[in-house]
Image: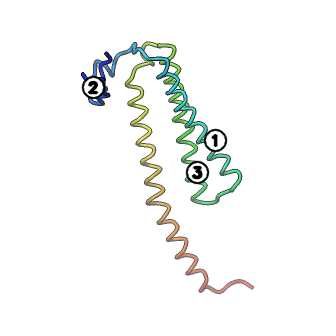
């Protein structure tokens, strides 16, 4: 029975983070798990391509374009790193196949998503507000003839 399952064969996330389980340098991975990991990371690639295609068709400007570029960068780099992790798990490379790389990948992804969310929820609304104020101010200025 895998270490991260409890007596009732239920998933126990606390046991997953047990150091002996997490830092096992030759972890056994079921073929179904490899396929699921590959599909998950390929889905990230498809999302990045979809956002890129949307950007080419809609041609967003300003903050929307920068936000789309941030999401494209996130999904494409995270899929590359995830597929590398999946490949090393499939090939059973000693150090590179460790489960702790998935935890590092997850922490890095959450941090990156936090920075994107912060940009999307704090910086963009402030910039829109400033642009509206500037536009209101500009309409009262004399225009060149």
Residue for badge 3: 68
Q: Is residue 7 left or right of residue 47?
A: left
Residue for badge 2: 15
> How far apart in space, not on screen, are marks 2 and 3 (Cα)?
37 Å
| Residue that extends furthest to the front in the rendered view of this protein | 8
> How far apart in space, not on screen, are marks 3 and 1 (Cα)?
11 Å
The residue at 41%/26% (across/down) is 101
Task: Kindly state the secondary structure of the residue where label 1 is placed.
Answer: helix
The residue at 33%/22% (across/down) is 22
Q: Is residue 87 left or right of residue 108?
A: right
Is residue 102 placed above or below 59 in the rendered structure? Answer: above
Compare marks 3 and 1 and give the one earlier in the sequence.
Answer: 1
> How far apart in space, not on screen, are marks 1 and 2 (Cα)?
36 Å
Q: Are marks 2 and 3 in contact (CB under 8 Å)?
A: no
Question: Which circle, 3 or 1, is nearer the viewer?
Answer: 1
Question: Which circle, 1 or 2, is nearer the viewer?
Answer: 2
The residue at 55%/75% (across/down) is 134
Residue for badge 1: 49
Is residue 29 placed above or below 64 in the rendered structure? Answer: above
Residue density around tag 1, few if under 14, some if 14–19, many if 20 or more, within 10 Å: some
Q: Position of residue 64 (x, y in %)?
A: 58, 57
Is residue 83 placed above or below 139 in the rendered structure? Answer: above
Q: Position of residue 144 (x, y in %)?
A: 71, 83
Residue 27's mark? Answer: none
Q: Position of residue 87 (x, y in %)?
A: 53, 20
- Find residue 43 and report its image quarter: top right
Compare marks 2 and 3 and give the one earlier in the sequence.
Answer: 2
Task: Kindly state the secondary structure of the residue where label 3 is placed.
Answer: helix
- Find residue 107 and report its image quarter: top left
Residue density around tag 2, few if under 14, some if 14–19, many if 20 or more, within 10 Å: some
Task: Kindly state the secondary structure of the residue where label 2 is placed.
Answer: helix
**Observer-nearest residue: 24 or 131?**
24
């Amino acid at each position: 029975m895998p270490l991260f399952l409890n007596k009732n064969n239920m998933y126990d996330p606390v046991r997953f983070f047990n150091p002996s389980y997490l830092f096992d340098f030759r972890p056994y991975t079921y073929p179904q798990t490899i396929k699921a990991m590959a599909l998950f990371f390929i889905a990230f690639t498809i999302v990045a391509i979809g956002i890129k295609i949307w950007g080419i068709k809609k041609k967003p400007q300003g903050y929307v374009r920068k936000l789309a570029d941030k999401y494209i960068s996130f999904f494409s780099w995270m899929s590359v790193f995830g597929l590398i992790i999946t490949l090393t798990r499939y090939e059973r490379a000693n150090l590179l196949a460790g489960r702790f790389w998935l935890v590092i990948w997850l922490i890095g992804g959450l941090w990156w998503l936090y920075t994107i969310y912060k940009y999307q929820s704090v910086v963009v609304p402030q910039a829109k507000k400033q642009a509206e104020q500037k536009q209101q101010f500009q309409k009262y200025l004399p225009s060149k003839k």
